[in-house]
Each structure stands twice: as C-alpha cells, then as structure tokens.
Image (tube, rainbow, N blue to C red):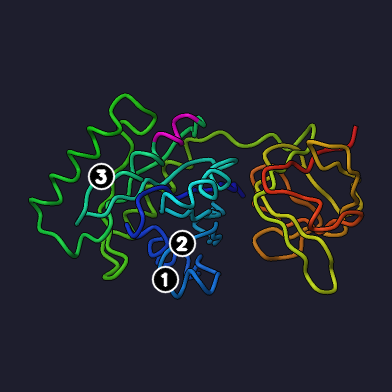
Amino acid sequence: MKSIVVGTAGHIDHGKSALVRALTGTDPDRLKEEKARGITIDLGFAHFMLDDLNVAFVDVPGHERFIKNMLAGVGGIDLVVLVVAADESVMPQTREHFDICRLLRVPAGLVAVTKTDLVDAETLELVRLEVRELVAGSFLEGAPMVPVSSKTGQGLDEFRAALVATAARMRGHAAHGVARLPIDRVFSMKGFGTVVTGTLVSGRVRADDELVIAPGDRQVKVRGVQVHGARQPQAVAGQRSAVNIAGVEVEEIERGQNLVTAG
C-alpha cells in the first residue's frame, strides 16, 4: 500500500483544519489554546485510508506569528494542499506559504478553494483567476483546483479523487539505505519515556535499532514504533511515524534535528 504525507498551506482562517477534519474525521487542532481561539498554533496530524492509498495530513498554522511551526511541518511532505478561502481569495500568508513550498521544492500539490457556500459563482471564478495568476510558472501550475465546502460537504468527493490521482503520479520512497527521520515533535509519554515524531524520508526503523540524534552524536535505542497511531514492527520511508527511544531525555532533543542510522 502506498503512503503519502500531505501538508496544508494557506492564510489563517481559510479552512485548512476544517478541510482536514471533513476528510479524515479527526480534529487536527489538539491544543486547548487552539480550540479556544479557533486557530491552529502548532502542527496538527490526521490520516485516512482511500482506495490503496494511506494519506497522512500535516496541518500547519496560517498565522504569521507561527511561521516557524509551519516550516517544521513542510519538511518531508510529498505534496501540498494550498487552501484559499473563496470569501477572501489570495492573502499574505497564502503567498508566504506558497513561496516557502517553492523554496523547499515541494514536488507536487493541488489547490482547495474553500468556503464556497459563502460566495456566488462569479466570485468563485474571480478567486480561481487570482490563484492561477499566483501559481503561474510554478509546480502548482496546471494542478487540480477543487472548490469545496467543509460545512456542506460539497466538492469533498471531487477533492478526494483529485488527491488520489495526484498521488498516483508520484514516485515511491526508497525504503533501503540510511534511515532519516526529521523530528517535528518530541514529548514524553508516561510508561514509555521519550517519543519523537516525523516523516521517515529514507530507510526503515525497527524496534531495537541503534540510531543517532543529529546534528550531534547522541546514540539512542528504538523501543517501539507506531505508524498512524498503531504499533508496528517497523516504519518505512514515506510513513509518518512515532518512535519511542531510550537513552535520551526530552529536553536534549530539539525540533529540526534528525533521527538517523548510527555510523
């Protein structure tokens, strides 16, 4: 089964989290402050199965104050969903997130024009034109642009179909060679100890593997692996994974470091 990691991008309150929630049934906003303020502050995660495709979503914050968190989320994604609200069109963080995706050479993506239940057909067409102008000459030129409403469900089936079609054209990940997992989250779990999460971009990770936190030379041992919330014997390249490690404390690891094969 093919696994892909999809990142969201776009301006604050343009419906990124609502779209992920409508597609997966999971609320990616996990922090109390996020729920209270109605905005995404840190990275959120959700996944769903579609045909023979395992899709993991990384939902990033749109507010300019949390751009460093957005940068942590974009690393390791296979494709991006650029989210543009139909009632506001292209906004400052739309452009900023799009530029970041280009600079980081995100290979593919599609556009979701959200909140279509709030506008008429003429306004929707104007938004389409603005988005086409924004992405002209980039990796998103000619990419699917799907109008959706997370509130009414209109367009969600079409969006899923476009996502599957886009993913089908992508090459798989190399599951051999050196394991490398860029760390986008680190925490301690009672009874387990230190856990790091991220997208495995190459190789594979198994229980009892001896790995290194890089930069640096801190050696750790893998106690267990979870993929999409379920314990697995191993994680392979292309999968979002949580790795329980021994030999290091949470305070000794920073977001942006890598978990790599020793030696």
Place of residue 176 in the rendered image (x, y in percent of width and height, measured from the top left):
77, 34
* For discs 2 and 1, the disc positioned in front in the rendered view: 1
Residue 18 sits in quarter: bottom left
Instruction: Indicate whether residue 102 is drawn in magenta.
Output: yes
Quickly name the residue at label 1. Answer: 37
Picture coordinates of residue 107, whole percent (x, y): 48, 32
Residue at left offset 51%, top offset 65%: 28
Span colored in magenta: 99-103
Q: Nearer the viewer, residue 241 or 218?
A: 218
Marks 1 and 3, the one that precedes in the sequence: 1
- Tag 1, which secondary structure? helix
> Is the Cβ of the residue at disc 3 closer than 8 Å to that at disc 2?
no
Determine the residue positioned at 58% across, 40% down: 75
Please report whichever mark, 3 or 2, sits nearer to the chain's N-terminal start. Answer: 2
Instruction: Tell me: 80 left or right of 253.
Output: left
Residue 40's label in the rendered image is 2
- Does residue 127 appear left or right of residue 91 in this picture? left
Residue 22 image position (x, y, % from top left): 40, 67
Give how far across and how far down residue 71 sits, in percent. 53, 43
Name which residue type carries label 1: Arg
Q: Which residue was labeled with disc 3?
A: 90
